[in-house]
Amino acid sequence: MAPAPILIKCECGVETRGRTGDVITCQGCGLHYDTSEQGKMLEIVAAKTQRQFRYLSRAGIGFVGLLALAGMYLFKTPGLVGAAVVGAVFWYALLMPFMKKRLLTKATTLYTPTVAPTRK
Ligand SMILES: [Zn+2]
């Protein structure tokens, strides 16, 4: 996974931007911040969120399939097509964007990286 941007707020008050995995040096006082551990944690959180999103996407296929079968049982071929379209629109156009937003919001609250400075 590509390194994520990170903002280091140094104890001297200066904020320095960098990327996870790097040793970031404060531009104000020269303290070093090793962000390799935080990069790993952010990757774990990102992988978990992607996994949840994949499950949701697969569950949608099952949902659309079941709805299509129910539609076919009730109204033959037009029911199959109609139920599949309604199911797909509901799941992928309405539910998925909503759930994606929720999962991303949750991911940002799962882990807030804090990095202790090292003096070299
Ligand atoms: Zn500093």
Image (tube, rainbow, N blue to C red):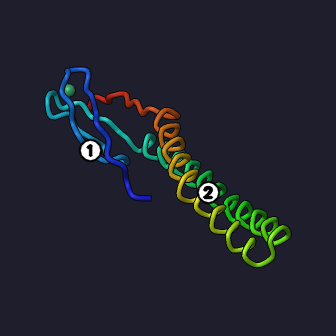
Return the residue nearer the eye: 108 or 20. 108
Q: Which mark is residue 91?
A: 2
Amino acid beneath label 2: Trp
Judged left or right of residue 117, residue 78 is right
Q: Residue at x 73, y 60 (%)?
A: 63
Q: Quadrant of residue 30?
A: top left
Disc nearest the viewer among 2 and 1: 2
Kindly give the residue lying farthest to the top in the view shown: 12
CB contact under 8 Å: marks 2 and 1? no
Return the residue nearer the eye: 9 or 37. 9
Residue 77: x %, y % from top left: 76, 78
Q: Quadrant of the N terminus?
A: bottom left
Q: Quadrant of residue 81?
A: bottom right
Q: Which mark is residue 66?
A: none
Judged left or right of residue 32, residue 68 is right
Return the residue nearer the eye: 98 or 54. 98
Count of all numbered marks drawn on residues in the image: 2
Distance of label 2 from label 1 (alpha carbons): 38 Å
Q: Quadrant of residue 73?
A: bottom right
Please give the residue where the numbered disc 1 appears in the rendered image.
18
Ligand number 1: quarter of image: top left
Badge 2 element: helix
Q: Residue at x 52, y 37 (%)?
A: 106
Q: Quadrant of the C terminus?
A: top left
Residue 84: x %, y % from top left: 68, 68
Residue 32: x %, y % from top left: 27, 34
